[in-house]
């Protein structure tokens, strides 16, 4: 294991560095009301543990290039939090067999799900009516799925299982004392990325189908077939990104796609946009584009303001960190921010543990309410099939 200690303040207990067991470090930091994030980048064999003993701070601006090394977390709507990398541990991941978690059998409430089903399909139908009346063109509606577990929950064990199950995803566990809950995600969607050579990257990700056919066989990305609905749904996200580029007169970008990608149990359409910020001498680009892009049409809709207003009316729950963004910034001159999708919020008290899964889907004129509901079921399963196994 490599231990990197950055900007270590005098107040940080020495014991932290001797807590080489990540599980112990997680519990210790939580007790001391510190903020922390554990993550593994897509296709990487390294995991990181960052601790900010102050609990993190709420930011007013997004001048990314002026930030110290740390971890950024933003809700769907609202100001981001920043966790400074006071302590940063790096460790190689050993490939382990995926085994069942220590969790006991969940208590799934079927009746509650039927009520949610009715509510969700009703609002998808209402959204289609609004689109047909010309009030907006696309909206992303989401819902939650709550499950209670009798017993303890090991965040780091769940994190390890998600890393094993989803090598292509950004896998993360996060705790910010002010928010109170623990969040876990295994997301396929990059929002803003910049490598040490100054290559900026963002993607338009939308359109969903199961990666398993009715006979139980895996559908290879090259064999996927997409309908007009999904092609159009993803094209809205591409157009939105290009509109953001136009706002800052950015013409020098490369566009590749759409291509089909495999994300866990699902297939999506993805278009990739890259910009050489060194060639353009434009080091502020990631911060500027971050404030323009979020929330994109992949999690919100088109036009943005109308979609935000409709989401506030149609959704029963607060999205909180779901469909916000999160990731490490300015570690080794790199930025890796992802949209917080395929995510679960975990609350523990009095020997009980409550998991709230979040999932949404893009609705267009051609949507079918029942299919959209099924899509949210599949998206919730991305985490449920690992955590509740
Ligand atoms: C909003 C979510 O997914 C987005 C990303 C990929 C595909 C999507 C879709 O097909 O609707 C969504 O735009 C979610 O997973 O909760």
Image (cartoon, grey):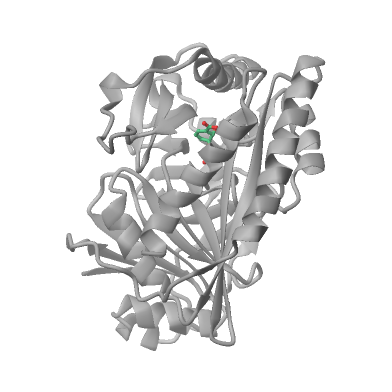
In the rendered image, is residue 276 in sight?
no
In the rendered image, is residue 240 in sight?
yes
Q: Is residue 349 above or below residue 308?
A: below
Image quadrant occupied by the N terminus:
bottom left
Q: Which residue appears at 78% of the width and 30% of the height?
A: 126
**Residue 315 vs residue 154: left or right?**
right
Q: Residue 343 location in percent, x, y?
A: 51, 53
Quarter location, residue 242: top right
Q: Which residue appears at 29% of the width and 53% of the height?
A: 165
Exactly how many numbered labels are in the figure? 0
Q: Is residue 119 above or below residue 229?
A: below
Q: Which residue appears at 66% of the width and 38% of the height?
A: 141
- In depth, the one of 246 and 368 nearer the eye is 368
Q: Is residue 182 above or below residue 358?
A: below
Q: Residue 383 location in percent, x, y?
A: 43, 55
Quarter location, residue 259: top left
**Residue 87 vs residue 232: left or right?**
left
Quarter location, residue 98: bottom left
- In depth, the one of 270 and 213 nearer the eye is 213
- In depth, the one of 3 and 100 nearer the eye is 100
Q: Residue 29 location in percent, x, y?
A: 48, 79
């Amino acid at each position: 294991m490599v231990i990197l200690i950055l900007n270590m303040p005098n107040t940080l207990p020495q014991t932290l560095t001797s807590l080489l067991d990540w599980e112990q470090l997680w519990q210790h930091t939580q007790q001391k009301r510190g903020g922390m994030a554990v993550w593994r980048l897509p296709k990487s064999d390294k995991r990181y543990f960052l601790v900010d003993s102050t609990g993190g701070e709420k930011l007013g601006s997004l001048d990314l290039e002026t930030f110290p090394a740390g971890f950024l977390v933003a809700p769907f709507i609202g100001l981001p939090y920043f966790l400074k990398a006071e302590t940063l541990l790096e460790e190689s991941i050993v490939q382990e067999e995926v085994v069942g978690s220590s969790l006991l059998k969940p208590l799934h409430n079927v009746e509650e799900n039927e009520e949610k089903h009715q509510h969700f399909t009703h609002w998808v139908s209402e959204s289609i009516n609004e689109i047909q009346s010309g009030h907006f063109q696309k909206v992303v509606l989401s819902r939650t799925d709550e499950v209670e577990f009798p017993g303890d929950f090991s965040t780091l064990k769940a994190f390890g299982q998600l890393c094993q199950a989803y090598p292509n995803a950004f896998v993360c566990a996060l705790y910010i004392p002010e928010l109170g809950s623990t969040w876990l995600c295994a997301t396929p969607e990059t929002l803003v990325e910049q490598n040490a050579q100054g290559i900026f990257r963002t993607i338009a990700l939308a359109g969903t189908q199961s990666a398993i056919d009715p006979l139980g066989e895996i559908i290879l990305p090259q064999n996927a077939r997409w309908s007009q609905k999904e092609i159009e749904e993803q094209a809205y996200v591409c157009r939105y990104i290009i509109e953001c580029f136009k706002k800052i007169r950015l013409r020098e970008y490369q566009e590749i796609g759409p291509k089909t990608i495999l994300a866990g149990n699902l297939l999506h359409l993805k278009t990739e946009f890259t910009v050489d910020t060194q060639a353009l001498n434009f080091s502020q680009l990631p911060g500027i584009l971050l404030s323009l892009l979020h929330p994109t049409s992949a999690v919100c809709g088109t036009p943005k303001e109308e979609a935000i207003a409709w989401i506030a009316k149609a959704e029963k729950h607060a999205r909180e960190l779901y469909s916000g963004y999160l990731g490490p910034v300015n570690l080794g001159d790199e930025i890796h921010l992802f949209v917080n999708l395929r995510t679960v919020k975990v609350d523990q008290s009095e020997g009980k543990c409550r998991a709230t899964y979040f999932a949404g889907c893009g609705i267009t004129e051609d949507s079918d309410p029942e299919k959209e509901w099924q899509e949210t079921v599949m998206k919730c399963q991305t985490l449920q099939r690992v955590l509740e196994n």
